[in-house]
Image (spheres, helix red, strand yellow):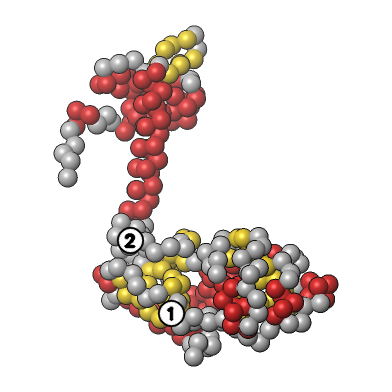
């Protein structure tokens, strides 16, 4: 670990004064923002310049203009202050309070499946606060505020426990109007219309066509989106046919804004949804409570054979 020399560590107050003056190009506006007097801000900037040993500003009438050294230093100082603020918020999120649960969730699963069910969890644990952040890829729990994550893929996550939740059934769908307009009744009919693609699952249409015995040569064409929610909305809007997990589009299927185009579903024997949490938090009461609840919520989901 690198030894930090105090000689090269200015006071935070001096850095804040310098950053504000650099951003506003005005000592008076910096003083206004920081609720200090102009002389106090000027003194802090002067202290910083003395410590560094070089001028950071040229004084031009009522304005301050950054020197070359000041311009470079201002960019670095702004980044450091932003990082320090973010790190402080992250440390505060590690509060030992029993009622705080930080979750990393897949965006569409979070908005379409988890959040609508969350009132049932809150009814059981009314004093709990649940914080959400969107994550689409595995990450290192160390150094993050997350207590758990919901992950789709294989049950492999270094230093973490992977609790199985459910498989998914992926079904071809489109809007009723789009189906009627293009006369979609067979897999061959689907193959000739616009195919809405999920960019993180680029071979999904090819796999489905192969399963139903239809040509796969056109399976990779079509507009791509990163999130299922965007693809679902595109399908509802009549922009094409989509392959979507059935449990994520239950409201649209129930309302009739999407219709299933085939009884053949796509499932994976390898990938599934998992609740993932670090081994170090496996016995945390709130993590255990959420694990038991979300596993129970998934009990009604149909699983792959």
Res. 295 in view:
yes
Q: Nearer the viewer, residue 169 or 223?
A: 223
Q: Is residue 298 left or right of residue 184?
A: left
Q: Is residue 247 left or right of residue 136?
A: right
Q: Secondary structure at mark 1?
A: loop
Q: Residue at x 31, y 33 (%)?
A: 12
Q: Is residue 32 above or below residue 107?
A: above
Q: Position of residue 195 (x, y in %)?
A: 67, 68
Q: Nearer the viewer, residue 49 or 199?
A: 199
Q: Is residue 130 left or right of residue 277?
A: right
Q: Residue at x 70, y 80 (%)?
A: 187
Residue at label 2? Answer: 140
Q: Nearer the viewer, residue 21 or 168?
A: 168
Find out whether the residues at labels 2 and 1 contact each other: C-beta distance under 8 Å: no
Res. 125 in view:
no
Q: Secondary structure at mark 2?
A: loop
Location of the N terminus by quadrant is top left
Residue at label 1? Answer: 270
């Amino acid at each position: 670990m690198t030894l930090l020399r105090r000689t090269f560590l200015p006071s935070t107050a001096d850095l804040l004064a310098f950053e504000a003056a650099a951003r506003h190009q005005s000592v008076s506006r910096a003083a206004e923002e920081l609720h200090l007097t102009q002389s106090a801000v000027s003194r802090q900037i002067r202290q910083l310049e003395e410590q560094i040993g070089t001028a950071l500003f040229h004084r031009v009438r009522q304005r301050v203009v950054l020197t070359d050294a000041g311009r470079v230093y201002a960019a670095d100082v702004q980044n450091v202050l932003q990082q320090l603020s973010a790190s402080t918020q992250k440390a505060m999120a590690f509060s030992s309070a029993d009622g705080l649960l930080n979750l990393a969730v897949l965006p569409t699963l979070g908005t379409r499946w988890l959040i609508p069910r969350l009132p049932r969890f809150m009814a059981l644990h009314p004093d709990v606060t649940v914080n959400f952040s969107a994550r689409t890829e595995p990450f290192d729990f160390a150094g993050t505020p997350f207590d758990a994550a919901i992950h789709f893929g294989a049950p492999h996550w270094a230093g973490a426990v992977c609790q199985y939740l459910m498989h998914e059934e992926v079904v071809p769908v489109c809007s009723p109007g789009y189906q009627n307009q293009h006369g979609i009744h067979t897999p061959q009919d689907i193959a000739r219309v616009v195919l809405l693609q999920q960019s993180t699952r680029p071979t999904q249409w090819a796999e489905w066509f192969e399963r139903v015995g239809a040509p796969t040569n056109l399976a990779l064409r079509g507009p791509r989106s990163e999130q299922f929610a965007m693809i679902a909305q595109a399908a509802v809007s009549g922009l094409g046919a989509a392959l979507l997990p059935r449990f994520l589009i239950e409201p649209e299927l129930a309302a009739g804004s999407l219709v299933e185009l085939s009884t053949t579903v796509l499932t994976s024997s390898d990938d599934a949804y998992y609740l993932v949490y670090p081994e170090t938090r496996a016995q945390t009461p709130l993590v255990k409570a959420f694990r038991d609840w979300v596993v129970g919520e998934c009990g009604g989901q149909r699983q792959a054979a």
